[in-house]
Amino acid sequence: MNAKMTPLAVLTAQLTPTPDGWQQLLPKGEFRSRDGSPTDVAHWFLDEAIASRLIDLVRNLKQDVLVDYEHESWFKAKQGKEAGAVLAAGWFNADEMRWFDDEQRQGLFIKPRWTPKAYEHIKNGEFAFLSAVFPYDEQGIPLEIRMAALTNDPGVTGMQRLAVLSANLPTPTQENGRMDLLKQLLAKLGIEIAEGAEPTDEQTQQAKDALDALINGKKDAEEQVATLSAKATQVDLSQYVPKATYDAMASQVAVLSAQSTETQIEQMVTQARNDGRAMKAEEDYLKAFGKQQGVAALSAMLDSRPKIAALSAQQTTQVAATKAEKGTAVLSAADKEAAKLLGISEQDYAKELEAK
């Protein structure tokens, strides 16, 4: 269907503020213009499938769609005049077109890239409406989006106001600054955005997943610290002592144990001499043996020895001795018996007595 045979509609909606910059171009369902159009069909109609086709047609153009002032380019084309001198108010492409169908927004929306001059006009309230130009078929179905325009002559009723007001539209400098900050934040999360591009839906999801991971990791760490703190408060401190205290106590026990062992050995050797199981000459040997082999080994050795009455008597009584002419001590019968049992000569035994 060529342009001469296809009816052309000019549809206008009022500019209103939205936080994300999307502005309604065509409404959902059946719609008409406030001036009574269309007159050749019952109404115009738009649904998601039709909107998707319109977006695909713009994508196939591989160029931006013009937003001008008051449809100047359309009127010039209608009059057969050149449109080269027409000033652009903004541009949009297929990636800046989207179908919405929720409680807040319904229909085909665009997100124009306004020129600085157009932005100032809108911010100052000098233009209040956005108007679409589209051909349609005999059922009132839009065939394509030819262009759009800023205008002050509203065409359609019941459409949502399209978003651009100074209170909600940042200046280009602010927008650039915010985009730079956003790119820096995404870079921290390992997501790189190409120069001049906006984050894709996939990159947005990656950023969300990365933030969720950081938040969950922080929560896990806090829970682990809380668990450890709770366990620390539940420990029965009466069952534990500081390491320094334990080491000091162990050292003291070792010293006391050594002192106790020496005392036991002293007592065992003294008892052995008193019982007649050891001689004075053996004291140092027996003590060294006890320290090296232990109290039990010393006790076993002394217990195996017989008790010699003569040796015992020497510990409790003082034996009077006189020296013979040759300088040897006079041995009693008990001394002689002791020398015999010890396997030494009476002379050597006498010398032992003199040494005492």
Image (cartoon, rainbow, N blue to C red):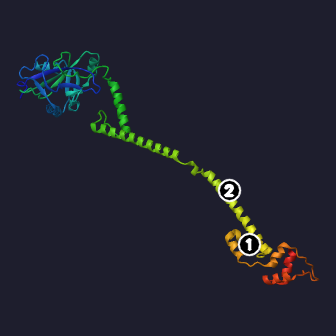
Residue 268, can we see it?
yes
Where is residue 128? Give x, y as percent. Answer: 23, 17
Q: Residues within 10 Å of mark 1 (few under 14, many from 20)?
A: many
Task: In the displayed orientation, state which residue is furthest to the right.
Answer: 325
Residue 269 vs residue 347, the one in the foreground: 269
Q: Is residue 204 above or below residue 154?
A: below
Number of numbered tags placed on the structure image: 2
Question: What residue appears at the point 86 percent right and 83 percent down from the top-left corner?
Answer: 333
Q: Residues within 10 Å of mark 2 (few under 14, many from 20)?
A: few
Q: Which of marks 2 and 1 is nearer the N terminus?
A: 2
Where is residue 11? Give x, y as percent. Answer: 15, 21
Residue 320 vs residue 104, the one in the foreground: 320
Question: What residue appears at the point 14 percent right and 30 percent down from the top-left corner?
Answer: 47
Question: What residue appears at the point 79 percent right and 83 percent down from the top-left corner?
Answer: 341
Residue 98, can we see it?
no
Q: In this view, does 81 lie above or below 343?
A: above
Q: In this view, does 103 lie above or below 122?
A: below
Callout 2: SS:
helix
The label shown at residue 252 is 2
Where is residue 111? Give x, y as percent. Answer: 24, 27
Residue occupied by mark 1: 286
Left/right of residue 298 with respect to residue 341 in the rendered view: left
For badge 2, the amino acid type reads Gln
Question: To which quarter of the image does residue 41 belong?
Answer: top left
